[in-house]
Amino acid sequence: MLPWLHVLSLSLSLAVPANTASTLLGVNPKLLARYAPDAAQKWTCLDRSKQIPWTAVNDDYCDCPDGSDEPGSSACSTGVFWCANDGHIGASIHSSRVNDGLCEYECCDGSDEASGACPNICKEVGEAYRNKVEAERKLRKTGSKIRSTYVAYAQKEKKRLEGVISAAEKDISEKEKEVARLKDIADRTEAISAEELERKKSSPLYITLLSQSTALKSLRREHEAAVARSKALEDILDSLRSNYNPNYQDMAVLEAVRSYEYQANLPHIGSAEAEANEEGSDEEDEEAKEDTKSSEIPEGEWSAEELEHQLDTLVHTDYVSLLVEHEKHIGADTDDPVYDITAYLPDSLIPQYEVLRTFLSTWLPKLGIIKAVVPGGGAADANKAREAYNAAERNLDQTKKDLDTAKEDLSDLFDVKGFGPQGEWKKLEGTCLSKDTGEYTYEVCLFDEARQKANHGGSTFSLGQVSNYFVFLKFSSWNTSPDATPGSPEYYSRQVYTQGTKCWNGPHRSVTVYLSCGTENTLNTIVELEKCEYQFIGTTPALCLPLDEAESKPRDEL
Amino acid sequence: MKVLGTSALTSTLVLLSILPQTLAVKAGDFRTCSQSGFCRRGRALASRAKEGIASWRSPYSVDPSTLSLSPEQSSFAAAVTSSLYPDVKFSLEVRLHEDGVARVRMDEVDGLKKRYDEAARWALVAEPQVSQDIKWTIGKTDARVAYGKGFELLVEFAPLRVVLRKGGKEQVVVNGRGLLHMEHFRQKAEEPAPVEPSEEGSDEQTVLKVENVRAWFEGESEDAYWEESFSGWTDSKPKGPESLSLDIDFPNHAHVYGIPQHATSLSLPTTTGEDPFFNDPYRLYNADVFEYVASATTSLYGSIPLMHAHSADSTVGVFHVVGSETWIDVAHSSAKSTETQWISESGILDLFILPGPTPADVFAQYARLTGTAPLPAHWALGYHQCRWNYVSTDDVRGVQKRFDEEDMPVDVFWLDIEYSEGHKYFMWDKKSFPDPVDMMNDVAAVGRKMVVIVDPHIKRSDDYPVYKLAQELDVLVKQKGGETDYDGWCWPGSSVWVDFFNPKSWAFWSSLFNPKQGSQWSWTDSTEDVYIWNDMNEPSVFNGPEITMPKDNVHYGGWEHRDIHNINGMILPNVTARGLVERGEIAKRPFVLTRSFFAGSQRYGAMWTGDNLGTWEHMAVGLKMTLANSIAGMPFTGSDVGGFFGNPEPEMLVRWYHVGAFAPFFRAHAHLDTKRREPYLLDEPYKGIVRDILRLRYSMLPIWYTAFRETSVTGLPIIRPHYVVFPNDPNGFALDDQYFIGSSGLLVKPVTRPDVTEETVYLPENQVYYDYFTNQAYRGAAKGKNIVVPAALHQIPLLIRGGSILPTRERPRRASSLMKNDPFTLRVALDNKSRARGELYLDDGVTFSHKDGQIVWREFVAEKEKKGKTVRLSSRDLAGANTATAVESVALATYDPQNSFARSIGGVRVEKIVVVGLISKPSSVSVEGGSQLQWEYVAGVAAGEKKEGVASVLTIKDPRVDVASDWAIVIKA
């Protein structure tokens, strides 16, 4: 791109090509046929807007509105100059580069400047170009071998998914039958026990339990909201502290930062102590904080971690089951083994048993053969039947879901907007590439999320994730440029990750990953050209197309 | 915001007074007059004078018995006494300079302390020469002197009153209203002063002392004499009260201009009197105002205490050289007069009265005092691409690549503060800028330059050589008491400031820019292609009062920061520029952009209007501010294209490029939080329009450079508002949205509103004006006339005044330095008598060889033969006949038209001549004494006709005449 030599002594008389020898200077070979005078020694501008004398072509004065009469000079502002570059590849340059005193690299034959001003370096340039092409070819060759393993992986994956699908389909039909059967049992068991259960439920113990549970859930909800709010506020303050822009010179902001630092026991950011201490003091502080926390817990109460764990269990308690358990516990010795018999029966006998059991449990007490048992036994039984049915149904749903996922994965696998026409990107799903830039380590896990991690303590920020909340949007992240059509190599040369953590006083963080063919999956450069908008530049073998494919495309120029 | 007053009237007034400020983002950061003790006292004095107007009499008078004339009799000195304090001694000196400028100096003599008297030393380019011819006549009650074209200067003794008259008419009256008050140094009374009054004002102070014989003048209370607080900051005021109030009236001038920098119209709106436009006086106190309001009297980054007063009869100027905070009230007691009051916190009275009587005279008089803007490097007139921040050496290369791919010309790439490691300027952040010298060389390879920021705050860090050196030299600003280095907070965090008032700091600072290793540490990671941007030199201190230094900080010589605050910003660009000149084997012209400035700053470089907003209002007011700077002697000026803050929509950005392309300094800049907006990122049609605008600017560089030569010699501004060009046309006195470029005859009115398709332009004379792009002829009228011109987004109202010849270079190039061998086009816009003239100035654009006569300065003239319709266009040398006024600051001993620069462009020709407004199709066009030329003629209206319509256009193809040679072309009817 860059001109490589200043022309020190430009002879101006040479800058004005006056004779016909140079009339064809700068003419693109494709247009050469049109640069000839008519019988009357006239010439028509290429856009046919004007007729001029043939002598006016390349006379260093712009006659044609389209600039076509001055292919060899800088006279027309819209012109294009052709350098033949014998020994290399011809090139077109803006006419603003012609006779400007600089030797253009693109014009290695030196024809853009007055004769003699620029040496012909096409031999060297051509050789360097050919070496570069060869090096690229080699890289591509090696890379494409790796890429072919990705393609093979996709094929294997395809087979695996097909296996998963057929197995799941079979599984589902069996499970559906099982669910129907369990539903039948549960329905019938419940018919018997529902009435009794209702009565139990009116016990003060159960009602109190229920309202305590409601209170617990509500408290937990409020607590979580409060924690989230406090965390969000802390994040804002943290982000404010590390990102606030001193250019605002806003004393209110400064005040906020300082108060926060005081509250959070942090050194003032940007201050000399802060920088000196940033690393060293952190650990000590952490320890100190831990100490104060644990020593403050009264005897018998739970620590934060225990609370977290226990609360979860408590909130998910099934109080109906508990009620039943409770009954069982109270009247443990009166428990009738009959009621547990289903557990020992083979599935095929259960329907018959159910009929028998209903008969017995209704009539035996009436006849005084056995003592009327606590109807809670009936409730417990109904509950178990319902649980069994629910579990079976959940299991079925899961299998159906697995099937759907497998089907979708299979269709994504060779989607041009997904893992590529050959599924070559499948192998890289979840592969994480990272780059340490000193202060931060940047990471992108392909098809998942990009992150910025502070190396010397501080928050990790999400820089953006593939928008995969809806499964069908999972691959909307390839090159969004309208010029890049799905399936083309340009399309796969960029991935976009958006909706990362919001910047203070700025947008949500986002990343565009620029990839090119390389033998390794790696990130080379991280740039933040605009605040919170990152560019990751790296390589991947997935973009190394096999040579025949790459070379079958015609190359027009450099 | 503040406690409202007790009565309905007061509260209304308070509301009114805070109204402009409430729009500002952080209005509370900066004082209003009522929050400033001395301003409050000054305004209270004025209101007492107004109330007691019948009996009001200034207490100051000259003691005639002490009067002594200087040997050449153009100056006199005398003692002045105040009836309030008969024991306090004041001195007065009145000098007349050779050019008729009068200097009035008054100081307290043998006081308890000394008033700051060095402001002129920084502002003036040299000690002015007093006249050898003009002689005072000393009478019993006055001293008077008559000189020049009907001028008379009168100094009345009791009370002291200074009057400049012209033809018997009062031009300037000093102390005519008796508001002169120089608060003498005094002892703090043992008894505590009365409780500090509310910040609302001092008018209604309760009477605490039983008898105060001075209360009629000074007020009852010692309002903020000894200590003053604002926004949590306390000013310890160790010297007590020392303010200076002064009334300067212009009984016969209805318009005043100048005293930049304020975001307001060129003709200054009133701040006091009946129904004032603003309620606070114009404030001069250099300040880093975040997101400043687009219409306010609030002080901004720079201060020039120069005011023009203008009427159809005459223009005069007053230049009050004071470096401390100053407030200026403006009122019109009648439609034809202006009254001003200048209230300064400290310093002596040092007033220059510039008699004019034309604007050009005032510019020349002011230029003789403070110097002119020297001719800048030619590349500095090109397009500057800036952003906070280009983030790496590769980023810079990438931006350059994109400009080149789009074939958009650009001369300079800028780096803001983030290039530096930890905001230690000069120290590259090697992670992102690993190869700065290579980067500079890559930029320079295409004939371009870089500008890198170096701010005056210095990070307190022992691994920073600049800090270590400054500390060892002991050249840092001290905190109050004068012992300890002042520590403030700026970009790098804890920082110190070099005290550039200390001469020891100069060589140290200048040497830092040496790219070669010398005896002192210097910036060896740089090249001679890098130039400097000095920002934050108000100085900006994030945790200081009003975002600057405490007033009781101590500078070299023991002066308080309050004394020198407004001067502070000018020395940094001065010593920076010196470093740039001295760093190479061959001295090259420096380029330094400064944000803060004072009278005289024009000698050191360019300025810009600071951190503007991306809004239409800021675009419009920015243009007015550049005009105000231009007429106040600071001609190399511009505002950030696009607006520093915000993301302008494409339409606004395009219009802003038009504004920028027609400003002397043309730079696009953007805040860190903004989206990238380099012109190549625009979509069509915007991108193409901006490319055309950039190319238009480059094609006109010969016109701009020629205008810069003129300003460097005469002090006439580069962009000229109407009152400067047509001083006798009252219709133009308040015009500040259209202006002329140098003496070229170009009249431009950038569009600064959205959704515009046509624009009204005012034509001030009976002359034809041509549309630059279409050659449409518009007819003006002797009484002035408004015309309507097309102004769609791709169009800028740009007219050529009939009678002008414009030299342009029409070949697009990547950078201006690549145009130096390109041929010229001459555009001859005939006036209604078929005449035209124009100038072209060229030199190497880089070195100081122009001062040795290595220049080409041509005049082009088109004249109609006395009889007949033949038009003769000729080119002749101007330098030889005007050796004294060819280049700035020196008179050329001789001029050799064959000088080596002229020879170096010997082959540069005129490739095209366009003659607009010929009466009829020529019969022949030929070089005089030479060959017939090829030409085309498109019929149209003639220059002298009354008809409107597209003018006739004669295009002469490649006459093959050299631009630096004498020649003539004859256009026969």
Image (spheres, rainbow, N blue to C red):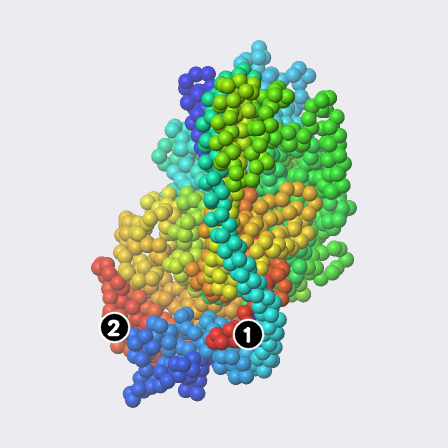
> Pointer 1: residues within 10 angstroms few (<14), some, or many (20+)?
some
- Total residue callouts: 2
| Residue type of the residue flagged with mark 2 | Lys
Residue position for label 2: B921
Residue under the point 34% across and 72% down: A65
Q: Is residue B241 above or below residue B666?
A: above
Residue B892 quadrant: bottom right
Q: Is residue B820 visible?
A: yes
Whole-angstrom CA distance, mark 2 to mark 1, is: 68 Å
- For disc 2, the neighbor class at 10 Å (few under 14, some 14 to 19, many from 20) is some
Q: Would you name the residue on which mark 1 appears? A: A547
Farthest top residue in view? B210
Vertical relation: B398 (above or below) B286: below
Q: Residue at x 69, y 23 (%)?
A: A301
Q: Which residue is rendered at x = 48% and y = 30% of the image? A: A189
Residue at 57% x, 48% y is A463
Q: Nearer the viewer, residue B480 or B920?
A: B480
Q: Amino acid at mark 1?
A: Leu
- Residue reaching furthest left? B947
Q: Is residue B599 above or below residue A389?
A: below
In percent of width and height, residue A383 lies at 52, 30
Q: Please give left or right for residue B498 compared with residue A169 in the image.
A: right
